[in-house]
Amino acid sequence: MHLIVMPGDGIGPEITEAALQVTDAASRRFDLGLSYDREDVGFVSLKKHGTTLRQDVLDRARSYDGIILGTQSHADYPPVEKGGRNISSSFRVGLDLFANVRPARSRAGVPHNMREGRSMDLVIMREATEGFYADRNMVRGIGECMPTPDLALATRKITRHSSERIARASFELARKRRKKVTAIHKANCFHMTDGLFLEAVRHVHEEFPDVVLDDLLVDACTAHLVKNPERFDVLCCTNFFGDILSDLASELSGGLGLAGSMNASSTHCCAQAQHGSAPDIAGRNIANPTSMILSVAMLLRWMGTRHNKPSLHQAASTMERAIDCVLADPKSRTRDLGGVMNCDEYGRHVAAVVAG
């Protein structure tokens, strides 16, 4: 199994290195034979090559068994014409990584932001290649324009094809969990776009009679996430709604630093921490690498399914259990969770638990 690793900006290099320590421990224990090629992206690439993402890097990424992508400071990149290419968007659209899979789970003993007695264990399935995102819904140009200095317009793209495949991925995942999918929409306002999305989800549901389907307005969903998160299993979302709800769910269940994430199609998968690049703490060795570690575990599980390799599933499960084991002890948590461990120390500690 050969992976391409791109550490990125801000805390990206630190959390990626910690995640690779854990992954290497899993590779040795389960004889995975993982190897890596590293490439510069983000500001390092911009300085060296005049662009945050070289096209040849994106093209070559297709040949790897998996992709590990660190955090990016794309809000601070220069305009596209000056080399500031959105890396996440480029991978999602360029490799057709349509499913952004974002679990949110509360952990025993770990501080969370829910009401006392509440718990969360859900997965948000976010369509990632279209929607209200201006950089990925046009063949040429972008989906925003300003006819006058005082008027800005945005175009939303929803297709039956993309809606059906994120729905199918949601139902397939729900079959492995608690067999419930909730379609998130705003069809009372977006009659055509969210109407088409809902129609597509309901059509695909006919293939999965053993899975319960309900739907919820996105604003009502935010309220239920706060007051009754146990009602959710798998949430099937369009791009924009899924982006917002996943941050809310992750913060409620313990914080973005604990939230793994992957972007996948049937042929390619990219592990990517759910949070941003946190430039204010970059280089201080205090970042929490849990999200990156869990994201790589998700990648290994995806690879295990794709290549029918149980050892990759075992490695992923071991990494996830090691995280729970380490977080159970307040002294072995990172500083954002009230502990004292630095980023590299935490990575070594989790790796030692994985090694057994």
Image (tube, rainbow, N blue to C red):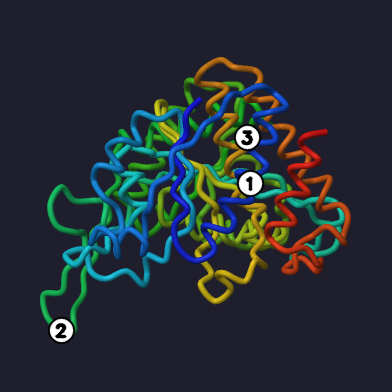
Q: Which residue is mark 2?
A: 149
| Residue type, numbered disc 1 | Ile
User: Residue 143 — which label?
Assistant: none
**Mark 1, secondary structure of its residue:** helix
| Residue type, numbered disc 2 | Pro
**Mark 3, secondary structure of its residue:** strand
* Residue 26 versus residue 159 in the image, above or below: above
Identified at 80% across, 69% down, the residue is: 338
* Front-most of residues 146 and 207: 146
Q: Which residue is mark 3?
A: 180
User: How crowded is the residue under tag 1: few (<14 C-alpha within 10 Å), some, or many (20+)?
Assistant: many
> Can you see residue 242?
no
Please say if the residues under marks 1 and 3 sit with CB atoms less than 8 Å apart.
Answer: no
Please say if the residues under marks 2 and 3 sit with CB atoms less than 8 Å apart.
Answer: no
* Residue 50 versus residue 204 in the image, above or below: below
Left or right position of 131 against 264: left
Left or right position of 103 against 277: right
Q: Which residue is mark 1?
A: 293
Please count the marks in the image: 3
Q: Position of residue 154 (x, y in %)?
A: 24, 65
Figure quadrant of residue 46? bottom left
Identified at 21% across, 59% down, the residue is: 143
**Mark 2, secondary structure of its residue:** loop
Q: Earlier in the sequence, mark 1 or mark 3?
A: 3
Q: Position of residue 122 (x, y in %)?
A: 65, 44
Q: Position of residue 194 (x, y in %)?
A: 37, 49
Q: Position of residue 59 (x, y in %)?
A: 27, 37
| Residue type, numbered disc 3 | Lys
Which is more foreground, mark 1 or mark 3?
1
